[in-house]
Image (cartoon, rainbow, N blue to C red):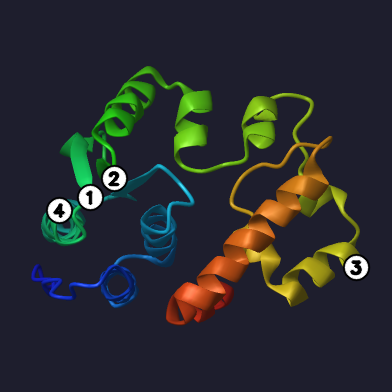
């Protein structure tokens, strides 16, 4: 994995925004990480969590994944600097009982980043969910009887319609039963924004996120 990322030289706000989006679209990050970063750049979320996690079963695999993740972490940090995003490594690259992982939190705002770090450390799912841009109604019912497992509870025809529309790829949170309709519109708005501002990523999302 190459560790170099292009510099941002555009001076107009519109040109700079476009350049940042293209930088993320053309990066080697996974599709969900790209989506999170672009939604952060577009102010649809206040923070994003990036990282890597892999279970290894042999010494050879451990060495390989450690080298891969070392390069990936360096790449992510350079990319975030290029995007002028504040960031903090909240989990250094480590091997915990055969699970190799690392985590980085990022935000535009210093105060938000500090709250993000605290929420991650305390396993504060509510604050964490709000910062990463989930609808507040969905955050409130997460892990309660009010959450709506739409993929299991909707009819096959309804699921097929959501997939045909492409919006199911953008429902990356557990909706609430009471506010499902509004939360679906929230996902449609993110879908519209990515389709308009990041068309290359949009096609990637539809291919890889079902």
Q: Position of residue 158 (x, y in %)?
A: 88, 63
Residue on which disc 4 sits: 77
Q: Position of residue 69 (x, y in %)?
A: 18, 55
Q: CA distance from mark 4 to mark 2?
A: 14 Å
Q: CA distance from mark 2 to mark 3?
A: 41 Å
Residue on which disc 2 sits: 108
Q: Position of residue 137 (x, y in %)?
A: 69, 33
Label 1: which secondary element: loop
Callout 2–callout 1 Cβ contact below 8 Å: yes
- Looking at the image, is mark 2 or mark 3 earlier in the sequence? 2
Position of residue 151 relative to residue 31, above or below, is above
Mark 2: give few (<14), some (14-19) or many (20+) Cα within 10 Å. some
Position of residue 191 relative to residue 101, above or below, is below
At x 34%, y 25%, the residue is: 115
Apparent side of residue 91 relative to residue 182 in the rendered image (left or right) = left
In this view, the residue in front, 125 or 116, is 116
- Looking at the image, is mark 1 or mark 4 earlier in the sequence? 4
């Amino acid at each position: 994995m190459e560790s170099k990322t292009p510099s941002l030289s555009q001076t107009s706000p519109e040109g700079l925004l476009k350049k940042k989006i293209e930088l993320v679209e053309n990066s080697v990050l996974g599709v969900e990480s790209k989506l999170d970063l672009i939604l952060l750049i577009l102010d649809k979320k206040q923070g994003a969590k990036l990282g890597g996690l892999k279970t290894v079963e042999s010494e050879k695999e451990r060495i390989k994944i450690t080298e891969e993740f070392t390069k990936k972490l360096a790449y992510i940090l350079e990319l975030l600097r290029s995007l002028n995003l504040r960031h903090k490594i909240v989990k250094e690259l480590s091997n915990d009982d055969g699970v190799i992982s690392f985590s980085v939190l990022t935000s535009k705002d210093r105060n938000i980043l500090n709250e993000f770090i605290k929420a991650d450390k305390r396993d504060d799912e509510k604050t964490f969910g709000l910062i990463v841009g989930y609808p507040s109604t969905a955050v409130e019912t997460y892990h309660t009887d009010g959450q709506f497992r739409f993929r299991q509870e909707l009819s096959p025809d309804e699921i097929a319609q959501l997939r045909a529309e492409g919006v199911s790829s953008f429902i990356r949170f557990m909706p609430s039963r009471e506010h499902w309709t509004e939360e679906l519109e929230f996902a449609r708005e993110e879908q519209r924004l990515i389709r308009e501002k990041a068309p290359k990523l949009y096609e990637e999302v539809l291919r890889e996120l079902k």
